[in-house]
């Protein structure tokens, strides 16, 4: 049967100051009337019922996750004691799925993506499940056809076409590439063979755990010990001890780039990881001067800016003679940055950490 594991531990630091430590990106309404994590659960409810769905988040976010997802039992929300990247999250999710179902197929997805339309995502997920049943030793990823030369995403090279199910093609994966510099990104876009790596996966839980044992044996052993203690009074103690000792590593580096058989479903849906403030330009219309404005704004000679204000609209943001800026007001913080430096906004968060300015995090 199909099980879902929603990864909800990210901090969304490039969305500061809208995304804060107390309420990271997945808990925000950035596209539509529901938060990103609520939209993620809604997309899969027709495929995996609550009793076959896990959400793995940070320990500090368990209560908010449960509040936002009332259809899930509280015990389906797992709090990681500390962040250890996606391999640990996937490994723990796989062990929990296997605990319930030795034949479990996992659909793994981040909680902070915008995917439209939802029915197309479900069609692709059904195709991925079918490919896993036909190729039980394979790992399946979802590739997004690129629309611009993005430097913030990893890329997947398409190999030979393997099958087409429900009108959705599946390919063998030729290679993976890390986030490229702009010149290489333009080459990858022009090739027509490369896709953005969505970070969404499907596989048998037993298969991914076996590959983790082969490539990350300490991690695989740790999550096995955690799940062995899951129904005992020692669960929290074992979880905290084992997680603290794990090395941070992504599932892509730990397994995907080394796996002998990786397949890619060509995504039929629109996808945006809403990774930074520039995503607003893809989600919102621009004015005649190419500004994206979600604020009470007065602008004179203002061009190509992103201007956002979170609040009651009583504040005015006025700009004069500026170009290519990101201007964000949220609560007790204001961000002004050049749009070319949007990838460095997380450095502000790092500096606030270093200076102990926790009230702004």
Image (cartoon, rainbow, N blue to C red):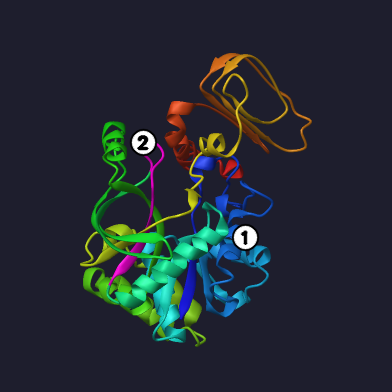
The picture places residue 228, in percent across and down from the top left corner, at: 41, 85
Residue drawn at (35%, 71%) of the image:
131
Using the rendered view, name the quadrant where residue 245 is placed: bottom left
The picture places residue 331, in percent across and down from the top left corner, at: 68, 38
Q: Which residues are magenta?
A: 138-152
Q: Please determine whether, in this image, residue 213 is positioned above or below residue 194.
A: below
Residue tagged by mark 1? 38
Q: Are marks 2 and 1 in contact (CB under 8 Å)?
A: no
Label number found at residue 252: none
Q: Is 82 situated left or right of 209 in this image?
A: right
Q: Is 175 situated left or right of 239 in this image?
A: left
Residue drawn at (55%, 34%) of the image:
281
Q: Nearer the viewer, mark 2 or mark 1?
A: 2
Under circle 2, the secondary element is loop
Residue tagged by mark 2? 149
Viewport quadrant of the C terminus: top right
Q: Is residue 142 magenta?
A: yes
The picture places residue 269, in percent across and down from the top left corner, at: 48, 53
N-terminal-most mark, 2 or 1: 1
């Amino acid at each position: 049967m199909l099980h879902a594991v929603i990864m909800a531990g990210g901090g969304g630091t490039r969305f500061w100051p809208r995304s804060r430590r107390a309420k990271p990106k997945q808990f925000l309404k950035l596209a539509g009337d529901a938060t990103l994590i609520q939209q993620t659960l809604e997309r899969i409810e027709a495929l995996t019922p609550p009793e076959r769905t896990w959400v793995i988040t940070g320990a500090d976010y368990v209560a908010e996750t449960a509040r936002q997802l009332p259809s899930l039992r509280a015990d389906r929300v797992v709090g990681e004691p500390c962040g250890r990247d996606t391999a640990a999250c996937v490994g723990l999710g796989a062990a929990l799925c296997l605990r319930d179902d030795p034949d479990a197929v996992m659909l793994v997805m981040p909680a902070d993506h915008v995917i439209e339309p939802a029915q197309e995502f479900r069609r692709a997920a059904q195709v991925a499940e079918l490919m896993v049943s036909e190729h039980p030793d394979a790992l399946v990823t979802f590739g997004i056809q690129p629309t611009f030369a993005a430097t913030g995403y990893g890329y997947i090279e398409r190999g030979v076409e393997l099958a087409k199910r429900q009108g959705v093609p599946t390919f063998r994966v030729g290679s993976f590439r890390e986030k490229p510099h702009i010149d290489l990104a333009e080459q990858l876009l022009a090739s027509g063979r490369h896709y953005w790596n969505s970070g969404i996966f499907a596989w048998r839980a037993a298969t991914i755990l076996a590959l983790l044992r082969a490539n990350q044996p300490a991690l695989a052993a740790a999550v096995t010990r955690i799940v062995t203690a899951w129904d005992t009074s020692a669960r929290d103690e074992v979880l905290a001890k084992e997680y603290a000792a794990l090395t941070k590593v992504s599932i892509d580096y730990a397994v995907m780039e080394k796996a002998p058989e990786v397949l890619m479903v060509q995504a039929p849906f629109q996808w945006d990881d809403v990774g930074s403030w520039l995503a607003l330009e893809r989600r919102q219309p621009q004015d005649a001067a190419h500004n994206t404005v979600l604020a009470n704004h007065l602008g004179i000679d203002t061009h190509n800016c992103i201007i956002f204000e979170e609040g009651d609209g009583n504040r005015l943001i006025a700009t004069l003679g500026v170009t290519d800026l990101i201007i964000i007001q949220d609560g007790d913080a204001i961000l002004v940055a050049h749009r070319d430096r949007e990838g460095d906004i997380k450095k502000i968060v790092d500096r606030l950490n270093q200076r102990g300015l926790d009230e702004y995090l």
